[in-house]
Amino acid sequence: MRRKNRFGYLMLAGFLAGTIWMIFGKSTVLTETGLLDDDLLRRMQAINPRDGSALFAYVLRRRGLAFLALALLSTTYLGTALCACSAIWYGFALGLFLAVGVARFGIRGVVLFLAAIFPQGLFYLPMLPGLCEWCVRTGRMIYRKEVRPAADKNTPVLLERVLSLLFWAVLLFAGCLLEGFVNPFLLTGWARLL
């Protein structure tokens, strides 16, 4: 397993676990969770996609707090474990959502899944494993006094860590913009077809 992809693999494992959990716990998930039920679809259809600023503020607050918490907790001994749990959890949620969509709507559930994660997923999906790698590397630099490769020695350590975190933060912000302003049009349009 390549070191750079370990959190991507953990997300994939979580995705598969979420899908399998849905398959084996189908009756419980479909009847007791309310995930993609008729009430939720009615609320999705009633969303005004033109009011993206409120959704953007909500999404930015939720995703931003999780981002900051993960970045700050990476400076503790639990940083690597928390990153692994986060990658598995997000993958699990995606797998469960896809499986529920397919169970409720058939092939249209796949399109609903894609409408729900597009276009912000183009930024979120590489951002989470990248942020987790940043967290692990930062934790190792703090606790194990791990040295950087020779190619990085021209940039001060703190500046390099801040700039790389800023890169992941820009990806998060771009994903939040798309989730708040573009995705509601796609999602409400597709929900009306269901």
Image (cartoon, rainbow, N blue to C red):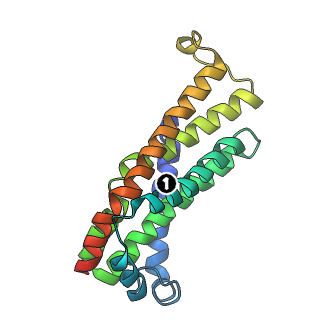
Q: Position of residue 9 (x, y in %)?
A: 48, 49
Q: Position of residue 114 (x, y in %)?
A: 31, 63
Would residue 98 be visible to someone looking at this image? Answer: yes
Q: Residue tagged by mark 1?
A: 11
Tell me if 161 is positioned left or right of 90 in this view. right
**Residue 75, quarter of the rendered image:** top right
Tell me if 186 is positioned left or right of 53 in this view. left
Tell me if 38 is positioned left or right of 132 in this view. left
Q: Residue at x 59, y 54 (%)?
A: 86
Q: Residue at x 43, y 78 (%)?
A: 23
Q: Residue at x 57, y 42 (%)?
A: 132
Q: Position of residue 129 (x, y in %)?
A: 50, 44
Say few, some or many: other residues with alpha carbon within 10 Å of mark 1 (under 14 / 14 to 19 / 20 or more): many
In terms of depth relative to the viewer, which is nearer, 165 or 59? 59
Q: Is residue 123 above or below residue 44?
A: above
In terms of depth relative to the viewer, which is nearer, 48 or 194? 48
Would residue 2 be visible to someone looking at this image? Answer: no
Q: Is residue 167 above or below residue 158?
A: below
Q: Identify the amino acid type marked 1.
A: Met
Q: Quadrant of the image for the C terminus?
A: bottom left
